[in-house]
Image: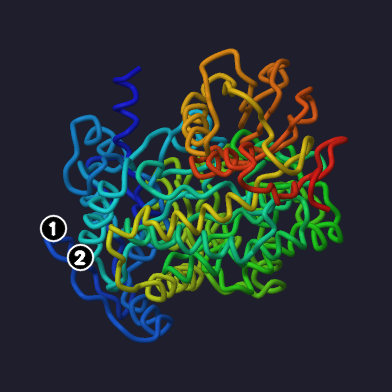
């Protein structure tokens, strides 16, 4: 298993612009369009050249005006690659890159295929998105910064002078790519429970500053989906909650915080993944909401995020029956253009959800790429076959099924986003700073919710024993240390039992002897617990567990209120 894990850890995500071929050589570029220049492919330099300055939209139009068809195709693809460094990889990573792109390193991919972006990926077994992230190329802030520096050096050799888009899914909670050495925010649902958009904005600004310091300039967050009555197992605590009005305050707060730090925010999964129990990683979920229900329950958080200036909207692979029955939203012009552009007035970059998910693999990669672009998407995330997607775009340009004007429009939006976000990079020392820890700790403290039990004073007496469901030893140890720091005596056995449960747990994971049960994810499972005291942190991060310890020790109140209904339990036993 260790050997498998090492192999998984070498995967690097190469951006949409990395549309690399699978053979030893990419297909020859088509003749330049009139007035355009074909870029020379040269080795990355050891230093990063200055970026152009001026109005982002003007710079983008000027740059795109020089692009060949191959340049345009490169801008709209964002796959992954292998290796935890841009220009040095081991034999396993080189073999993966040769299979994917006919090159050894990510830097060579960027140069050869004129890539516009790169997605950094990470695999963890308890991640609902694990199926589309089979490998890991992120470890810690220092490694990520070195990787992104190398990728940006490679991008300086490309036409247009724009930085590379380097994205990742740093939602926090159950979907968190970079875990070591960073300030871990709680899940979105924790912010929903806190009900304090000011704390949301401050925490997400801290997150943005840390991502920027590591060289990530696009974060696929926040999740703007509103949960329906049945919840959604694939979305769950990734959502701020079930109230569209409350979510419409939380989403823009996260956008303002993150983009205020120079990292573009991406709203997902448009037009809303919360009212279906299906998982779009495995099939095409049906959203049965009427148009009126969509307008009242699903769209408001997206509209609020767009009005806050979100740079990116990610499509959902969803069959929204009231809008375009039988057609996944990603491939629906009615949804990605008529609704998103015309009705909601979004002018930024529309990106697909991963194209290696089942609903997007209904067609060959080239046909799927063209369908998504014609629907109104500007970037294609993680196509399953890079050469196929790129070649399909070029063939469609040649035969007229994809108009060059559509591709120019997409590339111009992408470059505008890049130029708009370009700014001096923070020092790596900003990561996990005291100020960031404080901003996030405040949000964690505001999220803790008591569903049953006393509202004042210590919630445990005498020595405490902490137990946890299987696979949660790290969280159990973190709570033990936090309780000790709060002055609570903890012993290995025989004490008052505090039991931790989390993502994916079932009734069988509950402890019948626990005096206290604390949920570290969606709180629905608490309805089946017999514990006299029930709490939720909505997250298993060290700061969330420290907040829980302070409540258990009677050193802090529990001001949170569940942002989703939990059977017969109140939203809070202590807060109206």
Residue 438 position within the rendered picture, expressed as x and y whole percent measured from the top left: 47, 57
**Which badge, 2 or 1, comes first in the chain's sequence?**
1
Residue 53 position within the rendered picture, expressed as x and y whole percent measured from the top left: 30, 83
State left or right for residue 416 relative to residue 306: left
Residue 233 position within the rendered picture, expressed as x and y whole percent measured from the top left: 68, 36
State left or right for residue 430 relative to residue 306: left
Q: Residues within 10 Å of mark 2 (few under 14, many from 20)?
A: many
For the residue pair 72 and 510, the one nearer the viewer reads as 510
Q: Tell me where residue 465 sits by quadrant.
A: top right
Q: Residue at x 26, y 40 (%)?
A: 83
Q: Residue at x 79, y 45 (%)?
A: 572
Residue sitting farthest toward the top: 494
Q: Residues within 10 Å of mark 1 (few under 14, many from 20)?
A: some
Evaluate whether residue 150 shows in this view: yes
The residue tagged with tag 2: helix, strand or loop? loop
Q: Which residue is mark 1?
A: 43
For the residue pair 38 and 64, the one nearer the viewer reads as 64
What's the colour scheme?
rainbow
Q: Residue at x 71, y 66 (%)?
A: 339
Q: Which residue is mark 2?
A: 157
């Amino acid at each position: 298993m260790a050997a498998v894990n090492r192999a998984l850890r070498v995967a690097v995500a190469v951006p949409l612009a990395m549309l690399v071929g699978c053979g030893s050589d990419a297909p020859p570029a088509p003749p330049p369009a009139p007035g355009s220049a074909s870029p020379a492919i040269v080795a990355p330099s050891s230093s990063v050249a200055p970026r152009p300055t001026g109005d982002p939209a003007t710079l983008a139009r000027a740059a795109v005006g020089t692009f060949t068809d191959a340049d345009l195709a490169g801008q709209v693809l964002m796959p992954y690659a292998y290796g935890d460094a841009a220009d040095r990889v081991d034999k396993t990573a080189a073999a993966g890159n040769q299979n994917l792109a006919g090159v050894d390193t990510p830097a060579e991919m960027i140069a050869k295929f004129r890539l516009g972006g790169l997605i950094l990926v990470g695999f963890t077994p308890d991640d609902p998105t694990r199926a589309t992230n089979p490998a890991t190329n992120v470890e810690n802030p220092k490694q990520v910064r070195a990787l992104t520096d190398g990728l940006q050096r490679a991008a300086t050799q490309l036409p247009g002078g724009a930085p590379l888009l380097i994205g990742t899914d740093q939602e926090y909670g159950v979907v968190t790519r970079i875990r070591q050495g960073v300030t871990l925010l709680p899940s979105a649902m924790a912010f929903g429970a806190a009900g304090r958009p000011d704390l949301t904005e401050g925490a997400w600004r801290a997150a943005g500053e840390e991502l920027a310091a590591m060289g990530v300039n696009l974060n696929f967050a926040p999740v703007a989906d509103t949960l329906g009555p049945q919840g959604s197992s694939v979305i769950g605590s990734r959502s701020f909650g079930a109230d569209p009005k409350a979510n419409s305050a939380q989403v823009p707060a996260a956008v303002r915080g993150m983009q205020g730090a120079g990292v573009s925010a991406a709203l997902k999964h448009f037009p809303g993944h919360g009212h279906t129990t299906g998982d779009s990683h495995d099939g095409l979920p049906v959203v049965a909401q009427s148009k009126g229900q969509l307008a009242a329950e699903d769209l408001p958080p997206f509209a609020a995020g767009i009005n806050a200036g979100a740079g990116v909207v990610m499509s959902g692979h969803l069959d929204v029956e009231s809008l375009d029955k039988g057609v996944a939203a990603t491939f629906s012009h009615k949804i990605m253009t008529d609704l998103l552009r015309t009705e909601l007035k979004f002018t930024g970059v529309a990106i697909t959800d991963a194209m290696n998910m089942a609903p997007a693999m209904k067609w060959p990669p080239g046909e799927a790429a063209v369908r998504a672009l014609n629907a109104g998407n500007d970037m294609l995330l993680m196509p399953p076959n890079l050469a196929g997607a790129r070649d399909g775009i070029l063939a469609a340009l040649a035969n007229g099924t994809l108009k060059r004007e559509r591709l120019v429009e997409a590339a111009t939006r992408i470059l505008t986003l890049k130029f708009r976000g370009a700014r001096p990079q923070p020092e790596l020392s900003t990561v996990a700073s005291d100020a960031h820890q404080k901003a996030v700790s405040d949000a964690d403290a505001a999220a803790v919710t008591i569903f049953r039990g006393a509202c004042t004073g210590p919630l445990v007496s005498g020595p405490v024993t902490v137990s946890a469901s299987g696979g949660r030893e790290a969280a159990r140890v973190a709570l033990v240390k936090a309780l000790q720091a709060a002055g609570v005596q903890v012993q290995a056995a025989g004490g008052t039992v505090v039991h931790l449960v989390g993502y994916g747990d079932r009734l069988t994971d509950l402890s019948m002897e626990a005096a206290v049960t604390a949920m570290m994810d969606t709180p629905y499972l608490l309805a089946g617990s017999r514990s006299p005291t029930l709490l939720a942190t909505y997250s298993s991060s060290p700061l969330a567990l420290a907040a829980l310890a302070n409540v258990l020790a009677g050193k802090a109140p529990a001001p949170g209120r569940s942002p989703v209904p939990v059977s017969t339990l109140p939203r809070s036993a202590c807060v109206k």
